[in-house]
Image (cartoon, grey):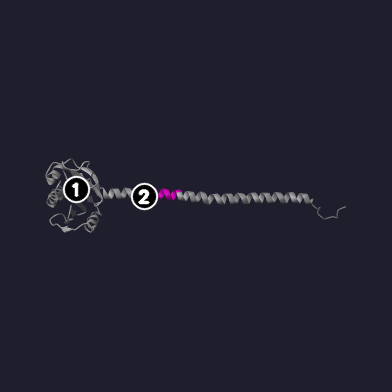
């Protein structure tokens, strides 16, 4: 007979089953929490890396576009005619073609005489040719001064052209007029570059700038 008010005791096996069920639920909850927290940072990091890479790509593309626009903003062949180049070289020349001009950071318009090397390469200076480069904008004076201060250049001041001008001592005439940098190289076949021919061509081109 049980005493009044005393709670009946539970079967020990029942307590073990309940305790085991609770432990299993807690373990499952902890495992789920760990799995969630370990995957989230990885997913976030991957997303951040992807976003950063995309942003860097866009920035690089924008920088490249800006640089190209700043350095190749003038078609140098638009300021000099085939007849003017032929007159400077003293013989007939081919129509002008565009080539890279690293010194000025722009594009050169290149004309070739009948004795020019074969094949012609407008990206580099060659004999029996006329090269004209025009760069316009805020960096024009920087390009001019950078070339003037180059160790290979023995700048000789030349008056009467633009705001300031110099002959580099061996190949070309550089002129600054306002925000425009003009560089001219006239290289006859079998003869040294001609400063007088470069000055003649500068006289024809400068009024157009």
Disc 1 is placed on an element classified as strand
The foreground one among 205 and 22 is 205
Res. 121 image quadrant:
top left
The foreground one among 44 and 98 is 98
Q: Position of residue 172 (x, y in %)?
A: 18, 52
Residue indicated by mark 2: 60
Residue indicated by mark 1: 132
State left or right for residue 32 relative to residue 128: right
Disc 2 is placed on an element classified as helix
CA–CA distance in space, label 1 to label 2: 30 Å
Please state the extent of the stretch shown in magenta in the rendering: 50-58
- In this figure, what is the number of numbered marks? 2
Q: Position of residue 195 (x, y in %)?
A: 13, 52
Of the image marks 1 and 2, the number of the one nearer the N terminus: 2
Point 51% across, 49% down: residue? 43
Badge 2 local density, few (<14 within 10 Å), some, or many (20+)? few
Q: Position of residue 94 (x, y in %)?
A: 17, 40
The foreground one among 19 and 194 is 194
**Residue 209 appears in view:** no
State left or right for residue 80 relative to residue 57: left
Q: Position of residue 137 (x, y in %)?
A: 24, 52
Point 18% across, 49% down: residue? 185
Does 148 appear above or below 119? Answer: below
Point 32% across, 48% down: residue? 65
Instruction: Name the front one of labels 1 and 2.
Output: 1
């Amino acid at each position: 007979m049980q005493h009044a008010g005393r709670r009946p005791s539970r079967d020990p096996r029942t307590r073990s089953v309940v305790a085991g069920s609770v432990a299993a639920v807690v373990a499952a909850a902890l495992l789920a929490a760990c799995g969630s927290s370990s995957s989230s940072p990885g997913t976030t990091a991957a997303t951040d890396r992807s976003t950063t890479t995309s942003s860097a790509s866009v920035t690089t593309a924008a920088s490249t576009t800006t640089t190209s626009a700043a350095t190749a903003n003038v078609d140098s062949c638009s300021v000099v005619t085939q007849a003017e180049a032929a007159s400077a070289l003293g013989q007939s020349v081919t129509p002008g073609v565009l080539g890279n001009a690293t010194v000025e950071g722009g594009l050169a318009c290149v004309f070739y005489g009948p004795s020019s090397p074969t094949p012609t390469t407008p990206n580099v200076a060659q004999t029996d040719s006329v090269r004209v480069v025009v760069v316009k904008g805020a960096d024009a004076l920087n390009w001019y001064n950078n070339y003037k201060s180059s160790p290979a250049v023995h700048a000789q001041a030349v008056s009467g052209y633009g705001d300031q001008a110099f002959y580099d001592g061996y190949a070309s005439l550089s002129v600054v007029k306002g925000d425009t940098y003009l560089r001219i190289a006239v290289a006859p076949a079998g003869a040294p570059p001609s400063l007088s021919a470069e000055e003649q061509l500068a006289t024809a081109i400068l009024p157009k700038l």
